[in-house]
Amino acid sequence: MSVEKKYKYSDKDLAEFKKLITEKISKADRDLKLIKSAYLNDHNNGTEDTSPTFKAFDEGSAVMSKESNSALAIRQEKFIRDLKTALIRIENKTYGICRVTGKLINKKRLELVPHATLSIEAKNMQK
C-alpha cells in the first residue's frame, strides 16, 4: 500500500477552514470595535476637581492607554487583513500550502493559526 502525499486540502477541508476563518474575522471585528471605542472614549474619571498632581498622573496614564490601544488596533487590523487573505487562498485552492516548502501545512497548525503561510519546518529554517 503506497502512501500518497497530499499537495492540497480537499474541498471539504477548505470549507471547514473557511468557516473557522469567517468566525475568527467576526470575532476580530468585534474586538477591534471595542479597542477603537476604548481609544476614542474620553476616559474622564472625574479628576477635574482633584489635586493637580493626580490629574497630571491621570493624563499621563490616558496617553499611555491611548498609545497601547492604538498599537492593539493596528495589530488587530493586520490580523483581520491576514485572515481575509487566507480566505482568498481558500478560494484559489492554495490555502494550507507552505510558501517555502510547497508542502501542506499541518492541519492542527492551521486550526491554531489559520492565516499561517509557513509550515513548522519552514518556520524553523528561518531561525
Image (cartoon, rainbow, N blue to C red):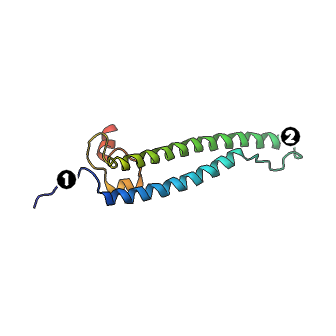
- Measured as percent of width and height from the top left, residue 29 is found at 56, 51
Report the residue marked by disc 1: 5
Q: Residue at x 43, y 58 (%)?
A: 20
Amino acid marked by disc 2: Pro
Task: Judge from the rendering whether residue 89 lies leftward or rightward of residue 36; answer left or right.
Answer: left
Residue lying furthest top: 126
Element type at mark 2: helix
Q: Quadrant of residue 126?
A: top left
Amino acid marked by disc 1: Lys
Q: Closer to the N terminus: mark 1 or mark 2? A: 1
Q: Would you place residue 15 above or below residue 60 in this image?
A: below
Q: Residue at x 42, y 49 (%)?
A: 87
Front in this rendered view, residue 6 or 69? 6
For the N terminus, the image quarter is bottom left
- Measured as percent of width and height from the top left, residue 111 is found at 39, 57
Disc 1 crowd, CA 10 A, few/some/many (<14, 14-19, 20+): few
Residue lying furthest right: 49
Q: Residue at x 82, y 42 (%)?
A: 55
Q: Which mark is residue 52?
A: 2
Q: Which mark is residue 35?
A: none
What distance separates the C-alpha of mark 1 from that of mark 2? 70 Å
Element type at mark 1: loop
- Measured as percent of width and height from the top left, residue 110 is found at 37, 53
- Measured as percent of width and height from the top left, residue 25 is found at 51, 53
Q: Residue at x 19, y 53 (%)?
A: 5
